[in-house]
Amino acid sequence: MASSMLIGADNLTLLKGASPNQLRFIRLQYSHRTHFPQIITQTRAATRTKTLVLKCSISAARPVSQPRFIQHKKEAFWFYRFLSIVYDHVINPGHWTEDMRDDALKPADLSDRGLVVVDVGGGTGFTTLGIVKHVDAKNVTILDQSPHQLAKAKEKEPLTDCRIIEGDAEDLPFDTDYADRYVSAGSIEYWPDPQRGIREAYRVLKLGGKACLIGPVYPTFWLSRFFADVWMLFPKEEEYIEWFEKAGFKDVQLKKIGPKWYRGVRRHGLIMGCSVTGVKPASGDSPLQLGPKAEDVSEPVNPLVFLLRFLLGATAGMYYVLVPIYMWLKDQFVPKGQPI
């Protein structure tokens, strides 16, 4: 079945002829004889802000207002209660490798060892290991709602001096204007309200601070779309940009990332598929005002409904455990230069 595919940001090219005070446009070139949605970048020299406007692809994502089976905090908690046992050995090798991590963290500009950094949804500390290569561990806080994931992080010697706390990405226990950098990798897919979580990222950063959010991308292949919508949130690139801009961030940029078999296509989606960054332009809280949380974890849950949702979500998740194996094998046989 034919499907639309998005290619990497390295194919962005600047159109010449724009004056300094005019809008400058960047377009995404076509390749592999496949039609791709256009990415337009608008920049005004007076404000030095950049806005990415991406046109939706032909495959419509399930609305964020309809949570997937593992997108609720309670389901995610129990999902990781078991996944934490094998997370570093099963998930990371296929979806979140060291070279991907280091590439995804480059836009975060971790250029000073004295930076104060919060790693939200830090889990087992795999992403934090990439952060402490550039920042002193004593200045880094790892936050996650899963004590089982955090227990794995505590076992890692380079993270000994990190502050490790349990917390909610949508209600961070940090003061306003607290951190120089906000990093979150592989967490947004479980947030009931991603806009609220990104708003919190804005709030806790200092003036000029930068947020770096790393997460999945929505697939274009019909079967992968089905399992993505059953399992957890796979946002589209334009949704990431919209959430950052609404929260108040400026100079919002998106960088595509992928494992070694990745050839720039989004056919099956990637659990770690893009790194989105934005800069906080003013001190204080986010200009975006929101209502009550989408999910109240204090409300009672029907045990049978919870169990059914959990089992269905975990079953759908197995599909994405197998995808990198399938893609790696395909990469061995499909001639280089052809999309897979």
Image (spheres, rainbow, N blue to C red):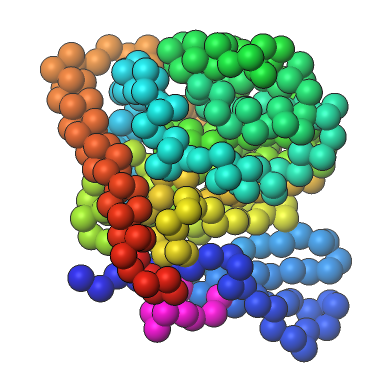
Kindly indicate the quadrant of the structure image that contains residue 302: top left
Chief secondary structure of the magenta portion: loop
Query: Is residue 164 visible in the rendered structure shown here?
Result: yes
Picture coordinates of residue 139, whole percent (x, y): 77, 20
- Quarter containing the N terminus: bottom left
Residue at 31% in and 65% down? 333
Image: magenta residue range: 28-37
Picture coordinates of residue 27, whole percent (x, y): 59, 77
Q: Is residue 104 above or below residue 337?
A: above
In the image shown, does 162 or 200 lie closer to the viewer?
A: 162
Residue placed farthest to the bottom in the image? 17
Q: Is residue 276 above or below residue 93?
A: below
Picture coordinates of residue 100, whole percent (x, y): 55, 46
Kindly indicate the quadrant of the structure image that contains residue 137: top right
User: Is residue 333 one of those drawn in magenta?
Assistant: no
Q: Is residue 71 above or below residue 247?
A: above
Picture coordinates of residue 245, whole percent (x, y): 63, 51
User: Is residue 32 one of those drawn in magenta?
Assistant: yes
Residue 185 shown left or right of residue 320 in the figure = right
- Quarter containing the C terminus: bottom left
Residue at 58% in and 73% down? 11
Kindly indicate the quadrant of the structure image that contains residue 172: top right
Query: Is residue 203 visible in the rendered structure shown here?
Result: no
Residue at 74% in and 77% down? 23
Residue 107 shown left or right of residue 195 in the figure = right
Residue 97 shown left or right of residue 333 in the figure = right
In the image shown, does 316 or 180 lie closer to the viewer?
A: 316
Q: Is residue 229 above or below residue 86?
A: below
Residue placed farthest to the front in the image? 332
